[in-house]
Image (cartoon, grey):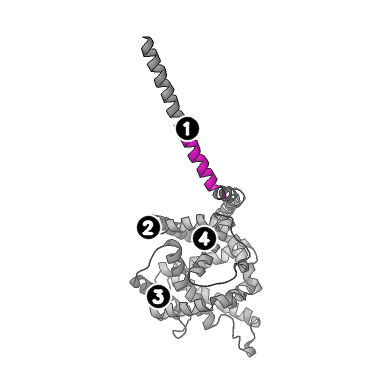
Amino acid sequence: ISRFAVVLYHTGYAQSGKTAFDRYNATGHAIVDWFRYDLSNPQSQGRKSIHMVRCMHGFARRNSNQLFDQENGEGIALSQYDMAEVMLGFAIVTHSLIEESMGYKFSREEKRDMASCWRIIGFYLGILDEYNPCVSVEELEACFDEYMTMTPARLISPRPCTYELQRTAIEGFGMGTGLGKEYWYGVLSLQVDFLKKRGVDFDETILNRKPKQGVAAAASGVFYLLRFDFFNRILSALVIRGRDLNAENKPAAEKAFKMLSVVGKVHDEVTWKVYSIVYVLRKVILLAVIAYLYLRRRGKIQRRKVQQRSLRSILRLV
């Protein structure tokens, strides 16, 4: 989302991978709070989180107004339109990615429930109903279809800051999750596949960086596992634990980040490089293994035949 990307860049989201991860992580923690706590209670952690986010939006709006030319119709930063676009991303784009990448299909009732949740969250965030795409599943899907028809034009005219936001986000998530940035380039590649399945045709070179061979397949495998409740429960527990740790013991959370950063670097420097080589040579390796097993089996058969002939010879002598 180009307009929102400019505001994020201006407010420091692309300073470094660490900064990017901290800020996106804070957004993720806020969303966890919105779904964990009662938003109808003004004193709940969820409402306090929403109040903090609205304050941050107000601060960013005041400090980013010079980025847009209001006289030429560019509007203001973090307008109702901008907020609605971001809401669209959380409310349905993520669902579509889950359905495409994980193979999990949401029922109509589940989609209706999620749309209702996000409509309420949007209300508390200050999005007016006339701009909120979550007033119904039908409205949400119609907005999404219109958004996707405009996506090719967005992709051929990205603002320069988009690349920096992309690079630092991938670097940050590589550090903060311990999976390494190569893994997240694989996830980005899956998003490209998602766009292609939606009929969006564009020049992939605008993405600047492709993953090492085979990493996208590994990322796809991880997403496949997440379609099962067992792995989803583990991931949910880790997310909630990370949120609570960050709130209760910031030094411990920072220590965990440093440890995961080291693990991520090892994955980038060793694991993904070795994996990529194995992936490229997988057919050769498979043929070599099959040939080895065949020759080994054949050798056993020949040795057995020799032993049988020897045994018959001995028996004749006896």
Residue drawn at 41 percent across, 62 percent down: 103
Q: Amino acid at mark 3?
A: Ala
Frontmost of labels 1 and 4 is: 1
Q: Please report whichever mark, 1 or 4, sits nearer to the chain's N-terminal start.
A: 4
What type of secondary structure mainly makes up the magenta span? helix
Q: Dot 1: what SS?
A: helix
> As shown in the figure, which amino acid type bears the numbered disc 4?
Asn
Q: Give the labeled residue for mark 1.
A: 296
**Mark 1 crowdedness (10 Å alpha carbons): few <14, some 14-19, many ≥20:** few
**Residue 272 located left or right of residue 42:** right
**Measured Cα–Cα span from mark 3 to mark 4:** 29 Å
Residue 246 tag number? 4
Disc nearer the start of the sequence (2/4):
2
Residue picked out by circle 3: 115
Single out the mark in the foreground, 3 or 4: 3
Provide the secondary structure element on which disc 3 rests. Answer: helix
Quarter of the figure with residue 134: bottom left
Q: Is residue 140 magenta?
A: no
Which stretch appears magenta? 280-296
Q: Residue furthest bottom?
A: 71
Compared to residue 306, the image places residue 221 above or below, namely below
